[in-house]
Image (cartoon, rainbow, N blue to C red):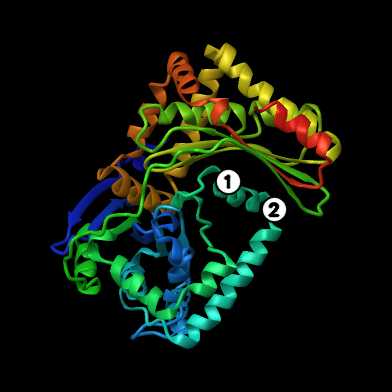
Amino acid sequence: MSKAFEYEPKFNKTVLSNGTRVVTEHHPYSRATSVGLYVDLGSRDEPAHLNGAAHFIEHLAFKGTNKRSAYEIVKEIEAVGGDLNAYTAREYTCFHACTLKEHVGLSMDVLSDLVSDALFLDEEFQKERQVIMQEILMSADELEEYIFDLYFEKAYPGNSLSNPILGTEASLNSISRDDLFQFYKNRYKAEHLVVSVAGAVDHEQVVKLAEQNLLFNSEQKIMENRTSPDMDVFQQYYKKDTEQVHYLLGLPSSSFKSKNRFDSYIVNAFLGGGMTSQLYQKIREEKALAYSVYSYLQSFTDSGLMMFYVGTSEEHIAEVSEMVLQEIKLIQKTGISADQLDFYKRQVKGQIMLGADDVENRMNSLAVNEMVFGEYRPVDFVVNEIEKVTAQSVQEFIEGHFDFSKAGCLLLGKCEPSLQEQVFSKVR
């Protein structure tokens, strides 16, 4: 690489007088700037009677403020070629915009408007509730995604982590406009907010914009509605008239703060994280038994899961599920070789470094690290942590987390009872 393009992104952090945290990472060669306003309110922070509220708020914020109509909100960003969006996760909500660097002030203005001054007009409330109802129905038709919601419901009964992010038809119908607006006002406070900006950005400019636009009074931070979850053991079949049977197995994994978090990256890459993984090669490439097969890491502040998904025909479900278990048990027994460890470390490090060139990805990393750790963790830090992973530390992760007495397993589709029993008996 030319020396002209070798640079260290410059990080800055300022805590405003009202408690809002502003974090920025300057990338001088980027034309784009990605701005995110993160509220540490996700679906696991909802009281039981308000399931779906965090996501509902995300929708309604776009339906009008005191300054802008719904159309004006999106028009102002799209008029300069930018992109405006939002999403709700289980532990936070993000409103974000990506524009050319000269329009960072516009991004901050529009996003601050959404977060601090949404109207929640009753007419829009009623309309958007119906939109989300359609989203719930659509999600139920996307079975490869829907099975993950079912898994959380079964794995964490009685814990707020079991809440579906979208809510349910029943929970949405029970939420009133006043209850939702009050929840918005209570939780969208300065102390709950992180402003994260990555790209060609001037930190002091962002701080001034935040001070001008985020006019929250300083108040005590509301404690989250979070308790560390205990994972239920289960084997559950859901009948669905489909061509494929969807299989999902979950095992305990590392939290964001676990000392073995980076070992979990390597194990995930090895087992099902890409096209060179064991499961992909053996189930899809060698046996041609599935199109979609992968493992997936889901980390939270206090817990985590490693999940293994395959979609296949009823004819092959018993064989495929057996192959998934064989690969997990093989790494439990034999660990990972030096050559394999070196290969997957290079793979994971390369993915992280390539992701660092995406300012939206960096915006998200800055915010999550601030919310979880309260500190900056540059790309080099993560790469160095991956480099420290050893075959022994991988084995310690596996021994400490891969406990089949805590496993959950789901089947979704058309599957005869005898096949269900074949699949579930091997997990017990």
Q: Position of residue 185 (x, y in %)?
A: 30, 72
User: How crowded is the residue under tag 2: few (<14 C-alpha within 10 Å), some, or many (20+)?
Assistant: some
**Residue visible at 39% across and 84% down in the picture:** 68
- Secondary structure beneath dot 2 equals helix
Q: Position of residue 89 (x, y in %)?
A: 46, 55
Picture disc at residue 291: none
Tell how many labels.
2
Residue 214 appears in the figure: yes
Quick one: which residue is furthest to the right in this view? Answer: 315
| Residue assigned mark 1 | 154
User: Does 200 sit left or right of 163 as displayed?
Assistant: left
Front-lying residue, 358 or 108: 108
| Image quadrant where one finds the C terminus | top right
**Residue visible at 32% across and 41% down in the picture:** 7
Q: Amino acid at mark 1?
A: Lys
**Residue visible at 17% across and 56% down in the picture:** 15
Determine whether label 2 and label 1 are within 8 Å by CB: no
Q: Position of residue 99 (x, y in %)?
A: 41, 66
Residue 200 appears in the figure: no
User: Does 183 sit left or right of 286 as displayed?
Assistant: left
Quarter where residue 177 is shown? bottom left
User: Does 74 sit left or right of 36 as displayed?
Assistant: right
Q: Amino acid at mark 2?
A: Leu
In the rendered view, would you say 261 is above or below 197?
above
- Secondary structure beneath dot 1 equals helix
Q: Position of residue 295 (x, y in %)?
A: 60, 36
Quick one: which residue is furthest to the left in this view? Answer: 17
**Pointer 2 or 1: first along the chain:** 2
User: How crowded is the residue under tag 1: few (<14 C-alpha within 10 Å), some, or many (20+)?
Assistant: many
| Residue assigned mark 2 | 143
**Residue visible at 53% across and 25% down in the picture:** 403
Front-lying residue, 205 or 294: 294
